[in-house]
Amino acid sequence: MAKKKTKTADTPKTTGQQLGSLIKSARDIMRKDKGLNGDLDRLPLLTWIMFLKFLDDREKLSEAEASIAGKKYKAAIESPYRWRDWAAKKDGISGDELIAYVNQDEAIRPDGQRGPGLLTYLRGLQSTNGDRRRDVIATVFAGVINRMISGYLLRDVITLVDAIHFDSTEEIHTLARLYESMLREMRDAAGDSGEFYTPRPVIQFMVAVTDPHLGEVVLDPACGTGGFLAEAYSHLEKQAQTVQQRKVLQEKSIRGGEAKPLPYMLSQMNLLLHGLDSPAIEYGNSLAVQITELGPADQVDVILTNPPFGGEEEAGIRNNFPADKQTSETALLFLQLIMRRLRKPRAGNDHAGRAAIVVPNGTLFGDGVCARIKEELLKDFNLHTIVRLPNGVFTPYTPIPTNLLFFDRCEATKHVWFYELPLPEGRKNFTKTKPLQIEDFADCIKWFQSKRRKENDHAWRVPVTEILNYDESGNLIACNLDQKNPNSVEALVHLPPEQLAEDILTKERRIIEIMEEIKAELTRAGA
C-alpha cells in the first residue's frame, strides 16, 4: 500500500503548476535537438528520463525506511548508475561525454572508471531472490534508444527533470494527472494500430461495477498505458488493511500484457506511480498463444480491458484460433482470448470469472465469424449487460460508437440487459472540450448495482431467443446484439401506427396514475 511521506525542510514541494512548467520547458528544449522527430521521439525520451528520477527518489525512501528498521537494503540500480550519481549533479557530465555514457555499450562512467554505458547496464539487469524490480527495469529499457544528438541539450532536460520530487504522494498524484495529459498526445500514432486510450470515467465505471475483491486476480491483456490496472489497484488498495493483505495486493492481484514498447514503459511507470512496487506486465502480444491450449493455470477472476479495434493481425496470430473463428479483426480475437482466460467455477460455491470490455459497434451486428463468436459467448457465458455509450465518448481518438460488454462464466445467457447512457440535457454529443464525466454514469451505476433491475427510458431487456437467429436446419443466420432502445424517439418513429398509438396511451395512463397517487398523498397530508 502506498504510504504518505513527510517532506524534509530541504526538499521543496513541486506544485502542479511547477510540474507543468518543468515538463513544458523540457519539451521546448527537446524541440531544438535535430535528432528528435516530433512527440513520437520526445515523449519516450522524457518518459525514461523521468522514470529514472522517479526510481531514484523511491530508492532513497526505501533506503531510509530500511535504515530506521535496522535492515539492509539492496538497491535495484547501483552506483554509479543511480540518478544521484550522474544526473543530479549540477556540474555533472555533459556534451559528448554524456551522450557517450548514455548511448555506448562501453564508456567512461561518472566515477572515472570504464564500464558499461547507462542504457546497456539497465538492459542487462537481472533480478534475484524473487525480487522482480531489476527484471522490470531491464524490460522497460530493452527497447529504449536515446535519439538526442546534443549532450548539452540533454543535460538541460535532465536538470529540469531533477527539479521534480517524487517523495510524497501528493506530488506523485499531481504527476499522474499530468502524465495522463501526456498520454493523450499519443492518439495520432495510436490510431493507425487501432489503439484508443480509454477515458478515465469509462475506466472508473467499469471497475466500480465489476467490483474486484482482494484475493482475486485482475488482468488486462491489452493494457496500453495501464489505466484499467491502475484503477483496479486503487480499488483493491482500499480493501488491504493488514500486512498479509498488502502482500497479496502487491504480489498476486494485478496482471497485464502489452505488445508495444512505449505503452509498455508508460504502463510500468503509471502503476509504479500508483503504488504497485513490481508491476507484472508481460511484454508481448497476448494473442500469440494457442487459445485451445489455455487451461486453469491461465485463467483469472476479473478481466478489464479495451482491446485494440480496427487493427488487423497477421496470419501467424490468426492461426492460434479455431479454424471457424479465425479473423484479422483484433477486437474479435481478443474477445475469444478473454472468454478462454476467464475462470471456470469449480466445486461447491466457487465463483466464476467475470469480464468487462470495450467493443466497437461493428462487433454487435457483425455476421459470419463475428456471429459465431457471439453465439459462443451467449451459449457458454452469461452476457448479462451491454452499456451503449453515446457519441463522442472517445473523442478525439475515434468517432466510432462504442459499447461496454459485461459477462461472466457462471451460466448460459437467458436474456441481455441493455442500458443506453444518455447525453446530458441539451447536448448532442461529448466533445474534446466537454468530455464524459464519471457523474454522467451516476444513474447507470445505481441501476447496474440494483438487485432487482427494472426497465426504464434507458434500460430494456431482450431474450436471447430474439438475438440468435437460426434457419430451419438449425444453422446460425445471425447474432444481432445491436438492439435499439424501444423507448427512444428513433424507435418510436419506426413503430406501426397502431403500436405507436398504444405506446402513447400506455404512457398517458401511467401519467394519470402518478397524478392520482400524488393527489392522494396531498389529501392524506391535509387530513
Image (spheres, rainbow, N blue to C red):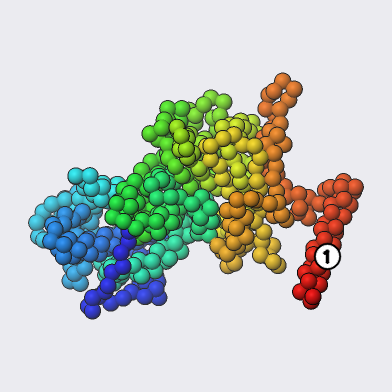
Most foreground residue, 285 or 31: 285
Most foreground residue, 407 or 197: 407
Query: What percent of the width, then of the height, locates residue 57?
Result: 25, 64
Q: Residue at x 65, y 46 (%)?
A: 417
**Circle 1: is it few (<14), some (14-19), or many (20+) Cα within 10 Å?**
few
Q: Residue furthest bottom?
A: 9
Q: Amino acid at mark 1?
A: Glu
Residue bearing the label numbered 1: 516
Q: Is residue 5 placed above or below 385 in the rendered structure?
A: below
Q: Is residue 408 left or right of residue 89?
A: right
Q: Residue at x 67, y 36 (%)?
A: 464
Most foreground residue, 186 or 150: 186
Q: How many marks?
A: 1
Q: Is residue 259 placed above or below 196 in the rendered structure?
A: above
Q: Residue at x 56, y 45 (%)?
A: 406
Q: Is residue 446 placed above or below 260 in the rendered structure?
A: below
Query: What percent of the width, then of the height, locates residue 146?
Result: 30, 55
Quarter occupied by the C terminus? bottom right
Query: What percent of the width, then of the height, locates residue 518?
Result: 79, 68
Query: What percent of the width, then of the height, locates residue 298?
Result: 40, 35
Viewer can see residue 110? no
Viewer can see residue 451? yes
Most foreground residue, 87 or 57: 57
Q: Is residue 231 left or right of residue 384?
A: left
Local secondary structure at mark 1: helix
Q: Residue at x 60, y 58 (%)?
A: 446
Q: Residue furthest left?
A: 113
Q: Is residue 43 left or right of residue 197?
A: left
